[in-house]
Structures are given as structure tokens and as C-alpha cells.
Amino acid sequence: MDSLTQIVLGAAVGEAVLGKKVGNKAMLYGAIAGTIPDLDTIVGKFLDPLTAIEIHRGISHSIVFSIAMAPLLGWLVSQIHRKVNATWKDWSWLFFWALITHPLLDAHTTWGTQLFWPFDLRLAYQNIFVIDPLYTLPFLIFLILAMRLPKTSPKRRKWNRLGLIVSSVYMLLTLVLKGISYQKFTAALEEQNIEYTAIDTRPAAFNTILWYANIDVGDAYLLGDYSFFDTKPIEFRFVPKDHQFLGDYKDTETIKRLEAIAQNWYTISRKYGNLYFNDLRFGVYDLDAKNLSFVFSYELIPAKTGLTIKESERDPEAMKQVLRSLWERMWGN
């Protein structure tokens, strides 16, 4: 999830664990802990682009990391606040829960997390977008109401508890909506007599009303969208995989690593003589556009060692049009 959401979640967890003893300090350190796992993006800036992608939401988003870091951070803060009515164990408990809830939340997004690192398993339930105002804003409001009250106030704990409950209920609701949208897509495929080997669904940006689906039909994918306000049947767009464009690059280490990252949901495209690896899990900017533009696309650059990659740049002006199209599509076809 986005940084603000993780800060809010971390602060609320910190308050739930230790707020009664240390007041707003619990929120402060919970918020700090909630951002620590995403420091892997800073580490990635010192690595090659492919490795940076691979480590994102890796070890720093694991149970191992939370268990190892919590007592260290707990000891450090206990030394800073020796006069506060909280022990090293108290602070360690706060850091553990603030750290572990970060990847637990991220697991609900499309990118997912390697919660069980070092095992090569990435959890990605794909039931919420990385930025969802309906999840974050009510949560933030309850947190602000809580932090304005004295640490011993029962209302403070009530507001914080409500924030945790409301956000959790909304998360459960997104799972229900994902299940309903999945049934809509599979029913449409059956009605249109389309045979497929796999289907992958996820919410559109900033909402859980509009949902997208990728369907594997062999040498191509079908891409579709469904809004809960739709009145017309679901239509699918045919997109060839074009993996043959890779030629001799197909068995290179770079392609194998990209395939693992994309979980084999990808297409290859050619533009101005250049090859691009398009990660299909994050879909396209506008499904109705004449020429599809993929959210995550990497240029494949020949090098002496095989291939290097460069992430395609995004056009800010084009993004504005995409957001307008998204808003219109969300309210039905």
C-alpha cells in the first residue's frame, strides 16, 4: 500500500499495543515502524534495475525481518525513553506488530509480499489497489480523533479501535467484491464459449467498483473489465503474447527472472525496433485505447552479458486522460 496508509496503520497498531502507557509516542513509533519495510526501495536505487524489482517487498516484508528487527528497535527506543512507563519488551511488542502488519496489508495488493522469505512464495490476493481512499481516509479520521485525546481516555481507545475495525471490515468487503467480479468474468467466458487455462482478476486504480481480468487462452490473452454498475455484457479484448519476438533471448537469465517476477503473465511488443517486456498483472492504462499502453513495461536492451532492462517512462499528460477514462468507466458501460 502507499506510504500514508502504512503510516496510519502503523500508528493505529502502535496505539492499540502501547498507547495507554505512552500516549502519542506509541503512534509515532508505530508510524515509523510502518514505513521501515519500504526502505527496500532506497536500497534498490544502488542496485541494477532488475535486482531492485526482485528485492522489492522481499526480505524486509517477511516474518523473519519483523522478528529480527523488533527487539533491536525496541531496545533502541527503550534507551531513548528510559523515563517512560514502558519496558524493552513493551517497545519490542509494538515494533513487531507495526512491522508485521505492513506486509500483511501489502499481501492484498497485486504486487504482493514475500511474507515467508526465504521461501520463494509471494502472496498477492489482489483485492485492493495500492491506493484506496475508502480504506485510508476513514482510518485516518479515526486516528486523528484518537490522538487528540489524553492517553488514559476510554474514547481514545474507542476511536482507534473503530479505525482498525472499519478498515478491516472494508478489506473483507473487497474480498467479497473480488469473488463476485470473478464469477461475473467466468460466467461471461462460459456464455461466449471461450476456453481458457487461467484467469487473473484485480481492482482498478483507487476503487473496488471496477475490476479487470486477464485470461490466458494459449498464444494470447483476453483482457476484460467489469463495473458493478454495468448493464451490458462483458467484452474481451484480444492481445497476442508474441513471445516469439524474443528469439534467442528467450532462454536468457534476464527473461527467466522477468518471467518469475510477472508469474508468466506477460506479453512482448516491438516498437521502433526495440523489444519490450510487458508485465500483464498490472494491466493497461486504458483498455479502450487503440494502441494499448502497459502500466509496467520494460525495454529489453542488448548487452555483452545478455540483456539489461529499463522501465518505460510514464507520460503525465496521458495519465490525466487515463484518470478521466477510469472515472467514466467506473460508473458503468
Image (cartoon, rainbow, N blue to C red):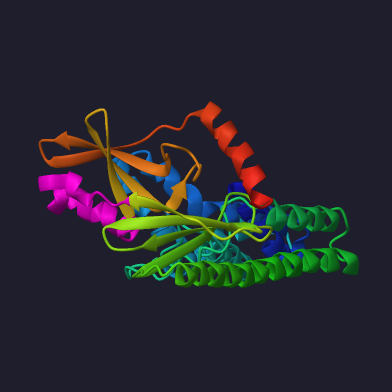
* In the image, residue 109 above or below residue 282: below
Magenta portion: prevailing SS class: helix
Q: Nearer the viewer, residue 109 or 189?
A: 189
**Residue at 74% in and 70% down:** 165
Residue 45, picture quadrant = top left
Q: Position of residue 12 (x, y in %)?
A: 71, 61
* In the image, residue 85 above or below residue 325: below
Q: Nearer the viewer, residue 222 or 204?
A: 222
The question of residue 161 being in magenta is answered with no
**Residue at 76% in and 61% down:** 22
Q: Position of residue 42 (x, y in %)?
A: 43, 42
* Numbered range of the magenta stretch: 240-265
Q: Quadrant of the N terminus?
A: bottom right
The question of residue 249 being in magenta is answered with yes
Q: Nearer the viewer, residue 95 or 314?
A: 314
Residue 139, picture quadrant = bottom right
**Residue at 54% in and 72% down:** 183
